[in-house]
Image (cartoon, rainbow, N blue to C red):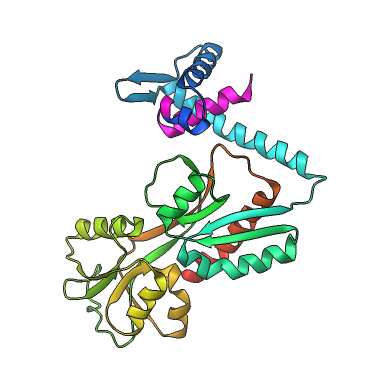
């Protein structure tokens, strides 16, 4: 069977519809429908239930999805490994990282790649998660690292690690009392990300879940300005611990726990419909290795 049929079915299953899969693949919806029908005929079972709002998987479709996904991954790895035996990774890789991640790991990544893969040329850019997502989606960069904030599954996402969200402030800032978690923040001036940012949505949902009133003094996305606000005692900030673990280590910033349930997930993103080059593959491998150390340090 043509593997494109299996790939099309898997994309329909993961994107939630025939039209979204067609849009990602850049083909007519009729071609997507034809591939799904060919697979249904081959296995002798209906894989999709079609309804007014789109499609959903039947039980047979769910079993097929769970079987096809690892098989295609193994096949892709086998093909890439065979092609790479006589080929040294080389060429440019455009990489977009969230501000906290690039600050924490950017230089280490550049040094490690230069030492092990000198023919791979990294080109790094930083941006907030919603921008990184769009850049990867529209092929402006090859790889993105961002906070997972419930965006759609039009990209392939791989978890790199979790970091706790904490209340960060200058050591002289009057933090809320230690008793009770989460703390009472009603009288604490806060710097928060601007509305629409992924972390801000997480903060607002967390506050609503715990009945917490937020005293918003600043809405600023830039991490350097945020740290200046903290350093001058203007406000405290709700941030990922990943972004301040150096300041916590040197004592220039203190933290207050917001509870074990408030964690920020960092993911690696690539486009579904673009091939992973050898240079991208070794870059992804290096990001995985460095992330293991990074998130351990951030804890």
Expressed as whole percent of the image width and height from the top left, the position of residue 241 reads 41, 69
Q: Is residue 157 visible?
A: no
Is residue 177 left or right of 299 when viewed as pictured?
A: left
Q: Is residue 118 visible?
A: yes
Q: Residue at x 30, y 62 (%)?
A: 194
Q: Residue at x 46, y 31 (%)?
A: 23
Name the spot of residue 224 as percent of width and height, x first. Answer: 41, 74
Q: Quadrant of residue 285?
A: bottom right
Q: Is 159 rendered above or below residue 271?
A: below
Is 8 in the magenta? yes
Magenta run includes residue 225? no
Q: Residue furthest bottom?
A: 172
Residue at 36% across / 83% down in the picture? 231
Residue appearing at x 38%, y 52% in the figure: 149
**Residue 21 drawn at (x, y percent):** 46, 29
Q: Position of residue 237 (x, y in %)?
A: 31, 72
For the record, the magenta segment spans 1-19
Farthest-out residue, right: 86
In this rendering, would 204 be left or right of 263?
Answer: left
> 224 or 252: nearer the eye?
224
Q: Nearer the viewer, residue 28 or 243?
A: 28
């Amino acid at each position: 069977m043509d593997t494109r049929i299996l790939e099309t079915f898997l994309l329909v299953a993961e994107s939630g519809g025939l039209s979204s899969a067609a849009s990602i693949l850049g083909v007519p919806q009729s071609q997507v429908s034809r591939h799904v029908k060919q697979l249904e005929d081959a296995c002798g079972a209906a894989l999709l239930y079609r309804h007014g709002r789109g499609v959903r998987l039947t039980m047979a479709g769910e079993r097929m999805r769970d079987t096809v996904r690892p098989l295609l991954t193994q096949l892709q790895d086998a093909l890439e490994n065979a092609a790479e035996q006589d080929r040294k990774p080389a060429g440019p890789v455009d990489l977009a990282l969230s501000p906290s991640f690039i600050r924490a790991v950017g230089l280490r990544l550049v040094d490690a790649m230069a030492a092990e893969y000198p023919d791979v040329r990294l080109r790094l850019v930083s941006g907030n998660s919603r921008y990184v997502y769009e850049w990867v989606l529209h092929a402006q960069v090859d790889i993105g690292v961002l906070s997972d904030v419930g965006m759609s599954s039009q990209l392939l996402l791989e978890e790199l690690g979790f970091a706790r969200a904490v209340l960060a402030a200058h050591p002289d800032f009057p933090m809320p009392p230690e008793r009770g978690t989460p703390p009472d923040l009603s009288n604490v001036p806060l710097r928060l990300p601007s509305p629409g940012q992924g972390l801000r949505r997480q903060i607002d949902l967390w506050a609503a879940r715990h009945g917490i009133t937020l005293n918003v003094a600043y809405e600023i996305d830039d991490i350097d300005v945020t740290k200046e606000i903290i350093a001058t005692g203007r406000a405290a900030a709700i941030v990922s611990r990943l972004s301040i673990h150096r300041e916590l280590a040197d004592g220039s910033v203190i933290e207050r726990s917001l509870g074990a349930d408030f964690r920020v997930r960092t993911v690696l993103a690539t486009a579904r419909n673009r091939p992973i080059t050898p240079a991208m593959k070794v870059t992804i491998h290096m990001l995985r290795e460095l992330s293991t150390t990074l998130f351990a340090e951030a804890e």
